[in-house]
Structures are given as structure tokens and as C-alpha cells.
Image (cartoon, rainbow, N blue to C red):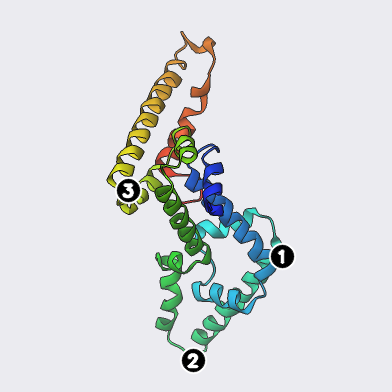
């Protein structure tokens, strides 16, 4: 029996762009929805956000775009009260300003990404779908969908190369990616050619959005990395 993750990956390979980016984005969007509607008052979730002192910049702004002001207000009221207590302790000389560095280090370093609940969930989602991609790669339907897909963005390709221990799968994935890069280069050249005043009346075909696909190919979907 195929696992649900297999079918999710199969469908994601039909979407525009990197399938792993798509799956992470979709899953994190649902996780944020669930969190805002069901878990903002949950003691365990409250403790987790307290530990990281909120969310990393990327996920905080993704959450803002969901438009659930009430859920966000509940979370940040709690965090603001916590911050206020700490600042008052410093002001009243009950604590040294140096004691505040535990928060400062979280806010200004990568530590917040280590603690952000959505960063951790995103990493787990990536690992799950990379495992499916590697284990099921030669499934005829999956292999076909991969060959006809956008492929992997560079950040996810690098993660894949680090994880895959099967030389044949690695070779076949790279062969597919090289073909996709060759096609992308041809489209980028065509896009540039049609900007020449002599050819501008030809209009744009599929190469018209090649430049945005190139951005995603090298950087992943917006907000994933």
C-alpha cells in the first residue's frame, strides 16, 4: 500500500515549481491555520512560543498574511506581557541587563529558527517527502511525473544530494535536472531575444515567465528558505 505522502508528492509534481517547496508551503499554511484557530490557547503551544519568543521573521510574516488578527493578538499579547515583566525587572534593578541576553540571542541569531515551531515542522515535512522521493523514485508514475515537472529548486536539490545514498537515483535525478537547466537557459535566451526591438512584435510564449522560474530554480519558492 502506498502512503498518503506518496500521493501528495505525485500530485505536487504536477504543480508549477519545486514540488518539495509546494508541499512545505501547503503544509505550513495548514499548520498555521490549525494553530491560529485551535491551539493559540493551548498550554503546550503557548509554552513553545514562549520558548522561542515568538516565531522567526519569515513565519511571523507568513502568519500575518493569513489575516487572523485575533489569533495573532492572543499570541503577541502573551509575549508582550512576558517581555514587559523582563524589562521591568531590569528597570527596577531586580535583574542585571546581562540576564536579558537570553532573549537577545534568540531574537538576533539563528537560534530562533531552531526553536520556531513552524521551522521545525517545515524540516520534518521536507525529510518526509525526500524519503518518499528516494524510496519510490522508480515507481513508473512517480518517475514520469518527476521528469515532466519543474524539478527541484537548487536548495532542495542540494539537500537531496546530501541525503540520497543511491548512486543510480542520484545520477538519474541529475540527468533530469541538467535537461531542465538546458531548457531553461534556452528559454531565458529567447526571452532576451524578444526584448530586441526587431523581434518584440513576435510576442512571448512559454519563455515569458522564464525569468521568474529561474529565480525559483535558484532560490526556491518565496518564504520557504
What whole-number distance in Å separates the C-alpha atoms at marks 1 and 3?
42 Å
| SS category of the residue bearing label 1 | helix
The residue beneath circle 1 is: 70
Q: Write the residue at 51% across / 40% down.
A: 13
Residue 172 appearing in the image: yes
In percent of width and height, residue 160 lies at 36, 49
Q: Write the residue at 54% across / 69% down.
A: 54
| SS category of the residue bearing label 3 | helix
Residue 62 appearing in the image: no
In the displayed structure, does residue 211 sit left or right of residue 28? Answer: left
Q: Write the residue at 65% across / 63% down.
A: 34
Q: Write the residue at 66% across / 71% down.
A: 40
Residue 144 drawn above or below residue 36 = above
The residue beneath circle 2 is: 94
Work out whether residue 36 or residue 172 is closer to the camera in this orientation and state it: 172
Q: Residues within 10 Å of mark 3 (few under 14, many from 20)?
A: some
Work out whether residue 54 or residue 23 is closer to the camera in this orientation and state it: 23
Looking at the rendering, which quadrant does residue 189 occupy? top left
Q: Work out which residue is located at the far top of the displayed protein and give it.
A: 198
The residue beneath circle 3 is: 161
Amino acid at each position: 500500500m502506498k502512503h498518503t505522502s506518496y500521493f501528495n508528492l505525485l500530485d505536487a509534481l504536477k504543480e508549477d515549481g519545486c514540488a518539495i517547496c509546494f508541499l512545505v508551503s501547503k503544509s505550513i499554511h495548514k499548520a498555521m491555520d490549525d494553530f491560529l484557530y485551535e491551539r493559540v490557547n493551548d498550554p503546550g503551544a503557548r509554552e513553545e512560543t514562549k520558548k522561542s519568543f515568538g516565531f522567526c521573521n519569515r513565519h511571523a510574516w507568513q502568519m500575518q498574511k493569513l489575516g487572523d488578527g485575533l489569533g495573532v493578538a492572543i499570541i503577541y499579547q502573551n509575549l508582550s506581557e512576558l517581555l514587559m515583566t523582563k524589562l521591568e525587572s531590569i528597570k527596577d534593578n531586580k535583574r542585571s541587563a546581562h540576564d536579558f541576553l537570553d532573549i537577545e540571542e534568540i531574537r538576533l541569531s539563528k537560534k530562533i529558527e531552531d526553536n520556531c515551531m513552524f521551522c521545525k515542522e517545515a524540516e520534518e515535512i521536507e525529510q518526509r517527502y525526500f524519503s518518499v522521493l528516494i524510496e519510490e523514485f522508480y515507481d513508473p508514475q512517480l518517475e514520469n511525473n518527476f521528469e515532466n515537472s519543474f524539478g527541484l529548486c537548487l536548495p532542495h536539490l542540494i539537500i537531496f544530494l546530501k541525503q540520497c545514498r543511491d548512486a543510480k537515483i542520484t545520477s538519474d535525478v541529475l540527468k533530469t535536472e541538467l535537461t531542465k537547466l538546458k531548457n531553461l537557459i534556452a528559454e531565458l535566451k529567447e526571452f532576451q531575444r524578444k526584448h530586441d526591438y526587431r523581434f518584440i512584435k513576435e510576442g512571448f510564449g512559454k519563455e515569458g515567465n522564464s525569468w521568474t522560474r529561474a529565480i525559483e530554480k535558484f532560490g526556491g519558492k518565496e518564504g520557504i528558505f
